[in-house]
Image (cartoon, rainbow, N blue to C red):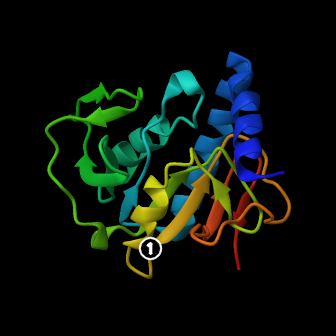
Amino acid sequence: MDKNTLRKVYLEKRRFLSQSEYERRNHLLYHRLIEFQQIHQFHCIHTFIPIKENKEPDTFPFIQYLWSNESNVEVITAISDLNSPILNHVQITEGTTFLENKWGIPEPQNSAPYPINKIDCVLVPMVVGSKTGHRIGYGKGYYDRFLQSCKDTTQFVGVTLGPLLEGDAFAGEFDIPMHSMITPFEVVEIK
């Protein structure tokens, strides 16, 4: 199956999750993210902000956990440039307010730019991913461009609510592989 077909199929599967199953998977994912952070002890985590109506993985509970329990960890997110496939990066805090952009993505308001060379870990949203570290996003290339500009030691962590696929037949030549994959069902660290 090609990437566009896989994207369409897995977006549809996610859309049809019941509310209770969506909440259950997010609860499991939350605990996996905490365990992953406790093992790796990142000091600066870049995370995506979910479009909840699209049933994306809800990262807000994990962000709240970091603010409440690991106040030394800086939490960074992105603001999309709606005219080009570029992400601008800002730090968010408990006092940050969010406003939805035209795609329904909540974006922080009045936040200062943040240097990407300080980021230790990037939580990367996935529509679907593989156990070999490959991911399919929304297909616009925002994250692939961003990940190319990160420092060599930055850990890329794919996050999805669905199970991971076997193999990597859908991997493209410009796709940036993940170092780890986190789902509600498992954490896979890529060798």
Tell me residue 51's x, y (percent). Answer: 48, 30
Instruction: State the image quarter where residue 169 is shown.
Output: bottom right
Q: In percent of the image, x 14 and y 50: which residue is there?
A: 112
Residue 107 is situated, as x and y percent measured from the top left of the image, at 30, 35
Dividing the image into 4 quarters, which one contains the C terminus?
A: bottom right
Residue drawn at (49%, 62%) of the image:
144
In terms of depth relative to the viewer, which is nearer, 103 or 21?
103
User: Which residue is tagged 1?
Assistant: 154
Q: Is 26 on the left-hand or right-hand side of 191?
A: left
Three-letter residue code for mark 1? Thr
Could you classify mark 1 by the number of other residues whose Cα lies within 10 Å: few (under 14), some (14-19), or many (20 or more)? some
**In this rendering, is residue 112 above or below 106?**
below
Q: In this view of the protein, can residue 184 be seen by the observer?
A: no
* Secondary structure under the numbered disc 1 in the rendered image: loop
Give residue 9's position: percent from left, percent from top.
77, 36
The residue closer to the viewer here, 148 or 156, is 148
Q: Establish if 167 lies above or below 61.
A: below
Q: In the figure, residue 95 lies in which quadrant?
A: top left
Residue sitting nearer the eye, 180 or 33: 180
Determine whether, in the image, residue 144 is placed left or right of residue 137. Answer: left
The answer to whether 123 is drawn above or below residue 152 in the figure is: above
Measured from the top left, where is residue 29 in percent x and y?
64, 43
Residue at (52, 26) in percent of width and height: 52
Relative horizontal placement of residue 95, taking residue 64 as reference (left or right): left
Quarter where residue 86 is shown: bottom left
Total numbered badges shown on the rendered structure: 1
